[in-house]
Amino acid sequence: MTGLEDDLAAAVEAPGTPDGAAGVRRARAWLTRAAEPGSVALWRYVEDVGPAAAVRALRDGTAPAALRALVGARAEQDASLADLRRAERCGARLVVPEDEEWPAFALHPLTVAAHAGGGDGGDDGGGDLDRTKALVPPMALWVRGEAPLDAAVDRSVAVVGSRASTSYGEHVAAEFGAQLGERGWTVVSGGAYGIDVAAHRGALAAGAPTVAVLACGVDRAYPAAHSAVFARIVDGGGLLVSEWPPGAAPHRHRFLVRNRLIAGLTRGTVVVEAAARSGAQATARRAQALGKRVLVVPGPVTSALSVGCHELLRDAESGARLVSSAAQVIEEVGDLGSDLAAPPGRPASPRDGLSDLARRVLDACPVRAGVSAERLAAVAGCGPLEAMRVLPGLEISGLVEWTGTGWRLAPPPERARRR
Amino acid sequence: MTGLEDDLAAAVEAPGTPDGAAGVRRARAWLTRAAEPGSVALWRYVEDVGPAAAVRALRDGTAPAALRALVGARAEQDASLADLRRAERCGARLVVPEDEEWPAFALHPLTVAAHAGGGDGGDDGGGDLDRTKALVPPMALWVRGEAPLDAAVDRSVAVVGSRASTSYGEHVAAEFGAQLGERGWTVVSGGAYGIDVAAHRGALAAGAPTVAVLACGVDRAYPAAHSAVFARIVDGGGLLVSEWPPGAAPHRHRFLVRNRLIAGLTRGTVVVEAAARSGAQATARRAQALGKRVLVVPGPVTSALSVGCHELLRDAESGARLVSSAAQVIEEVGDLGSDLAAPPGRPASPRDGLSDLARRVLDACPVRAGVSAERLAAVAGCGPLEAMRVLPGLEISGLVEWTGTGWRLAPPPERARRR
């Protein structure tokens, strides 16, 4: 790796080569620093033209004006190589959608939502969208820790709640964290004070891996008091994950953007303690919008920190279900076939008539880089022969395509027409 | 009042006279001692032939064998006059369905359920029915206290829960009792240890009337430790109510039969603390079967006394709604138009097309003795002119009838044919 322009050229001109892959990674590294995550328009543009061409266009001024406005003066800067090296020094890496370990299965509802949301995509800008509410996959993820990202979040549950928790809430979060960990489930949380860290600690106490999704660089400990916990997470086979590059500061609005990822990476979100109008409630509503399970632990009605939980449970539209034990959580998220229900309001599609097996294999298909049937089978939880049996049917239905080297999702009809 | 046979004869031969009314009251007094409550077959028989004729037939052996089996050797005994006098001595009275103060409005769903349940009624016996689960109105109610029974339970809510409550549950029950009382709602409960008495005490502390529905005679204090509370209930404008005559002992099965009445007299049941498989859960399910609101207060998931509450909230079929304050309870039960929803599975009927006002007036109509339009209006919560405006339409639809002295519900079509 040397000059950014050379690497971008390699990505555009020699895709599929090691140099091309390195260029794609560098382009996505550049994007994570150049633009705040959460823009559906930018994500669609990168999907349409590819990351390297997108970076080129943003830098030379040929990208749509609304997208250039998102990047602003950062278009002229380039810290991508420094960021990748800085990550390497702290045991981190950049995981991109083109990687095998990209959690395409978990992020599928976010991908669907980003395709479905807004107008015709691409040219409609998006600078005026509320990024804190946008349902859009990350451009890439900075990941610190040994475990492959997709394996870590495959059977995962978010446990979230108030920072100003009570000893009751911390006890419950730690207990849920430990019991989920003991039963082979990864606890995902935000690494914050209160419920978050209690859940992480519970998983660590059970010797189970846990994932902290941060709103700052994975080389930073925020809050500083949790630096030892973060180190134990990495040492214990868990991961620190962030959409922001190394060194990025934990700005307030980043927590809101980050919350969608906690909901998006997991099969369900458990809210342990939440005050009225809290971030945990927002995460729960995000989970529901993605068709993921929303599970809520009640508490004493005399506690202000139960108000948000009880509000969710009283609101029939939240889809929230009361849980009082980790076993009840697993009962809700354990059914692979039904926990990726289509987001509400999605029209009837060829998917609807699929067998459970075919749907699982389809959900396992990545958006961009094709992968082998063996890999699909591993993600879908079936044998390779079973996966190979349903793939031809999925291809005939126009749902998947063969890239020459692997299987991936076929683009939606409207995008295919535009190409 | 002298001999039972003379009084029964007066009831049969001179209905509408003071002697006839006294005979009816004595017949129902006899029935409360002769047969344990909860038999749909016996209730229907009394409805069909009238209370005095029913008592005669049970005593002279001409009643259906299955009904005679319910009464057994008690057919030959008669303590009705003694019971009425004993009641009088302790400031109690027998309230019968023929009385103005009979809570026909509140008990309407129990009446509907008793008409709907089982086969063709009357001759099918019923000795093998599970009386603890039967949804059937009481034959009569022994009532101790000054307030008219119907007025006392018109705007009432049951607050029930575990006897082995925690201080959390007692605090919540007392707080709900006080706040409901302050806002003009009567708290109905069972007078037992724990949640029951905490709810009664909360209402008393707010200077509000409260009603204890007992599983023993209203002249007995059970538990004995609550004799002072029961005295304060009576002195504070509240009531002690029982289906059993004075002196009756609090046998275990009577509590289960009694629980349907707590659900049946009120607009909704609030469960505060309940262990798994508890009586409070049973009361809640009874309330739901009657189309009344089921409201559940959650608690810490670490408490065994929250298990029953959380089970109700997790069971979608229970119809239970989470409440965390008395205000939320009132929100649920305060809507007069919708809180008497038809029991599930009831077929479409002329009722369905009625206006809200017409339905309220209909629900206010008693089953037996006709009452004035003014009285209907008072129960239905509308003006007398409004009531008079909808009554002709209800009569044309065959839903109400004019007895010559007042309005009452018309008998259901199948019973009308049989007559």
Image: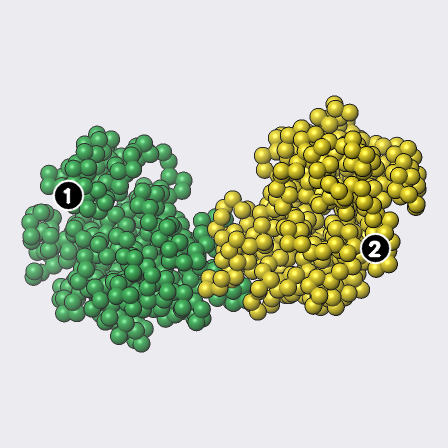
Chain colours: A green, B yellow
Identified at 33% across, 49% down, the residue is A334
Camera-side residue: A244 or A383?
A383
Mark 1 — residue? A374
Location of residue B320 in the rendering, given as x and y in whole percent from the top left corner: 55, 50
Identified at 10% across, 55% down, the residue is: A22
Q: Can you give x and y, in whole percent of width and height, for residue B326 in the image?
A: 62, 60
Q: What element carries label 1?
A: helix
Find numbered disc 2 in the image and state the secondary structure of the residue it sits on. helix
Residue that numbered label 2 is attached to = B87
Q: Is residue A275 visible?
A: no
Name which residue lies at 73% across and 27% down: B415
Q: In this view, does B218 lie to the left or right of B158?
A: right
Residue B283 vs residue B10, the one in the foreground: B10
Instruction: Name above or below for residue A305 compared with residue B143.
Output: below
* Quarter of the figure with residue A164: bottom left
Q: Which residue is nearer to you in this view: A58 or A46?
A: A46
Q: Is residue B14 above or below residue B383?
A: above
Q: Do the residues labelled 2 and 1 touch (CB within 8 Å)?
A: no
Q: Looking at the figure, which quarter contains the N terminus of chain A?
A: bottom left
**What amino acid type is highlighted by mark number 2?**
Ala
